[in-house]
Image: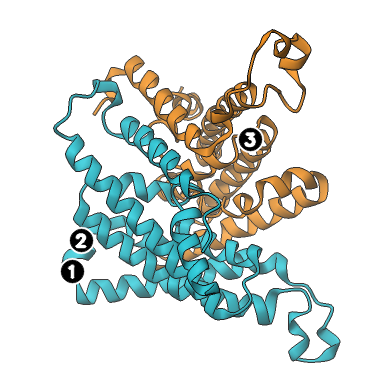
Amino acid sequence: MKNFDLIKLPFSKNNPILVQVLGICSCLAVTAQLKPAVVMSLSVIVVVVLSNVIISLLRNTIPPRIRIIVQLVVVSTLVVLVDQVLKAYVYDVSKQLSVFVGLIITNCIVMGRLEAFAMVQKPWASFLDGLGNGLGYSVILIVLGFVREFFGSGTLWGYPVMEKLGLYEVGYENNGLMIMPPMALILVGLIIWWHRSKNKDLCE
Amino acid sequence: MEYINIFIKSIFVDNMIFAFFLGMCSYLAVSKTVKTSAGLGIAVTFVLIITVPINYLLNKYFLQEGALAWLSPALANVDLSFLSLIMFIAVIAAIVQMVEMIVEKFSPALYNSLGIFLPLIAVNCAVMSGSLFMQERGYANIGEATVFALGSGIGWFLAIVAIAAIREKLRYSHIPPALRGVGITFIITGLMGLAFMSFMGFKL
């Protein structure tokens, strides 16, 4: 039951974006379209799971004074690997994500989970915690990517949905505001509003 | 003239927070009072001014393709740019450690009020992306890189002080309970981002 909670809680009650307010930067910058959002989610899941496991294995040998540097070295090694894989297999998306793949290093979710969880827990629990938080992060990214691409450009994964439905002929216009970065912030704000009104105990 | 252009551009047009949403985590978490946020803004600016030029030199003389040619002509084809993420974060982590010691020595009050967010400047996306943008945009000389770092730092400082001032006033306003705190801050940041978009294409 406890292990199941590690996966389940980050989805809603302890969502990294909505409740812990971590990893906002990348969440806003890469969600103008669905495809980069999904690629970014997968990269973050890989990095957070592996770094959680590695740090958890090393946790008894890391001196507390230099722990941040040790964590950063582990995380940045993983990120370099992810970056190279993306460049090799999905070059166009990797160009679109530009510096944001590198910024997974400084993604607060990764550091936050390492500090709060992996430094004090066993590897298997850390694995589940990383997976749960990675998935909780991905859910928000994919929702944002879906809404922004659908209403902003009228496409989904590059497929012109609105055009096929023939809505442009009856006077439908794309909402250009949705593609602009500030709209991502406002959408996250609205999701937080909805989420907290469902979970009254989270209100400030 | 080029310097002034880069300076103004990095403060307003390419503002780290309102145009790229970098450094959002500490921006959201520390912006409760103007005083603390001004302290953090200065610390971030300071770290940026030191790390970006150092990383510029690293990039120019070690990491870029063909950068090692000054050592011996045989190394002219070596491209170490895949190491740049690790090198940059190592420099940043070292400088942040130093800043932490200096602040602790000379201003214990500021040190206590910043708490965990001082060491976390190391994983502040604004600092890391300062170095990454410097690499991506290819500034012509170290002066331009330094001016860019100063501008980005001041832009970040202005943004966090502005939102802190707004949040101090917001405490007396009537907001739906579920939207209080993080939710409304997100929405206001989005609106400020929209306002900052009016600087787009601004050139001196």
Tag 3–tag 2 contact (CB < 8 Å): no
Three-letter residue code for mark 2? Asn
Residue A175 lies, in percent from the top left, at 58, 24
Three-letter residue code for mark 1? Pro
Residue A75 lies, in percent from the top left, at 57, 55
Vertically, is B56 above or below B71?
above
Vertically, is B122 above or below B94?
above
Residue A159 lies, in percent from the top left, at 77, 23
The subunit letter for the residue under badge 1 reads B
Residue in front for this viewpoint, B35 or A115:
B35
The picture's colour for chain A is orange
Q: Residue at x 49, y 45 (%)?
A: A25
The disc placed on residue B112 is 2
Element class at badge 3: helix
State the CA–CA distance, disc 2 to disc 1.
6 Å
Q: State whether residue A20 appears in this view.
A: no
State the CA–CA distance, disc 3 to disc 2.
38 Å
The picture's colour for chain B is cyan
Tag 2–tag 1 contact (CB < 8 Å): yes
Residue in front for this viewpoint, A162 or B91:
A162
Residue that lies at the very extreme toward the front in this rendered image: B204
Q: Provide the residue designation for mark 1.
A: B108
Labels 3, 2: front one: 3
Vertically, is A137 above or below A87?
above
Three-letter residue code for mark 3? Ala
Element class at badge 2: helix
Q: Provide the residue designation for mark 3.
A: A37
A170 left or right, relative to A64: right
How many residues crowd around disc 3 within 10 Å: few (fewer than 14), some, or many (20 or more)?
Answer: many
